[in-house]
Image: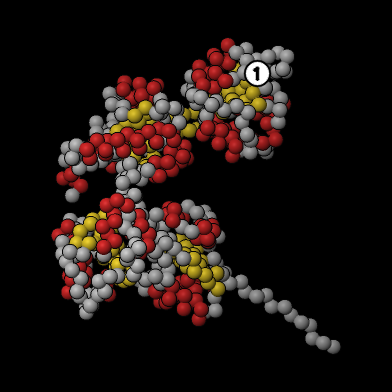
Amino acid sequence: MSAARTTRKKKTRGQIRFVGTGPGDPELLTMRAVSALADADVVIPDADVDAEPLLVRCPDDVEVIAPEDDHAATAKVVVREARAGRQVVRLVSGDPALFGPFAEEGAACARAGLAYEVLPGVSAAIGVPAYAGVPLTTSKRRDVRVVSAVDVDGWQSVDDDATLVILGAGASLGAVAGALVDAGRAESTPVSVTWHGTTTRQRTVVSTLGQVAVDTKEADADQSAVVVVGDVVTQRERLSWFETKPLFGWRVLIPRTREQAAPLTERLRRYGAVPEEVPTISVEPPRTPQQMERAVKGLVNGSYEWLVFTSANAVRAVREKFTEYGLDARAFAGVKIAAIGEQTAKSIEAFGIRPDLVPNGQQSSEGLLEEFPPYDSVFDPINKVLLPRADIATETLVAGLDRLGWEAEDVTAYRTVRAAPPPAETREAIKSGGFDAVLFTSSSTVRNLVGIAGKPHTTTVVGAIGPQTASTAEEFGLRVDVVASSPSVLRLADEVAEFAASRRDDMTEAGQPFRKPSEMRRGARRRNR
């Protein structure tokens, strides 16, 4: 009789991914890095990695573990988590294999017999000079040497033809420059020093080896910098592209919720701005849900010819009711759908529906009415239009539909209430000129911001999405600098950037140094030092 064969269940082991995060800009992540973060059970970021904007790409239940004081101790944590069957992402600034922990921690993973991968990142040695407008090679300069600041002191000689990229220079900047001069480099050799590279806090100083210690004496010595030494630095004057963006470093206030402000925030970042969302309203369910319940049943029963959405909040309210009743987009069959503008249309499309009508011209109630078809008893079997809107919606759309022969059923889908005041430091920045610009996207954002935080400072650039919003801002005593030529948040961002670029050009032509609006208020220069 043969012995019964037993099957031993193999213990699941996790995988380790050493992920380079780049120099600072979270959008420099590679596609494979984004995929690794989406699968992560555990994230172990280095202390110099700004993990917050990266963690939004991870599952909600991801665990974040701080690294230990040295690579050997951190490697033990990495191995422990992987042996427990977890997907481990080790986040490293720049590239894991260039002055990174991969050599030591990867060896520990290999000894433990664990599977691991290296997902290269944009090294600070490459990314930061590129963002500073300093090419590391030209047709005449082909040699590049990347070194750590701690290795420069004590050099006996240095190749005059090679471009040097020095990482980790901070408090040792003067000593590094002195060491290079002692090793044979001329004091007149051009030098660029860049702090906070690839971020909207980036700052670059161009000097020479003999003068750099003096020119950077007011810099924060505790902050690490990337230094480039060589003739290639002279190219920056004409190749600087990042720090010359029209809104570079501008702190821009957006009085909307983060979800509503997403397209505007993204566009402003492209211009180099630092957007900051401050919610001025809070969206809440209606006090009595019966209206919405009857409206949803009417949609299912075919009681409406048209469904008109005037905001993304209205789309969200209807979608939540559908989810509550176990319905999906199929319930819209036979109903024509209109959106007041492009952003609302995108919210509808996210529901799996393509709107039948989006105005090509003005994206407002008036613009929608100009293109809305009149009721025709021959072609329209039903003359009812459903309008799920806010409790404070105006009567313009209802009256216009009535003139076109339609019967509009105006339903309160959600309530808007004034949001709580922002933190004290934000209120102080608004009133004292700490923001360079504020962009108002409706009259209610003007009223509510002033109500919860006070009036923006006179030096703050004010942008308005349209004439009505501008008029409301002026009623509160604000000087409106930019009124969007069309009621689009993206157009508003574009035209504020054009305004800033024009102001920069005017100051340059007048021989004046360009300063951001927040730097022009009384005492700002003193406080910024």
Q: Position of residue 299 (x, y in %)?
A: 67, 27
Scheme of colours in the image: secondary structure
In the displayed structure, would residue 405 be above or below residue 124? above
**Location of residue 45 with respect to 200 vertically, above or below:** below
Q: What residue is at 74 percent from the left and 80 percent from the top?
A: 6
Would residue 421 be visible to someone looking at this image?
no
Residue at the (24%, 64%) spot, across then down: 170
Residue in view at x 44 percent, y 27 percent: 486
Furthest residue to the front? 140
Q: Front-most of 372 and 308?
A: 372
> x, y (%) of residue 44?
44, 65
Q: Nearer the viewer, residue 229 or 442?
A: 229
Most foreground residue, 117 or 144: 144
Residue 59, how many percent across, how many down?
53, 55
Q: Report the residue that reaches farthest toward the bottom.
A: 1
Residue type highlighted by circle 1: Lys
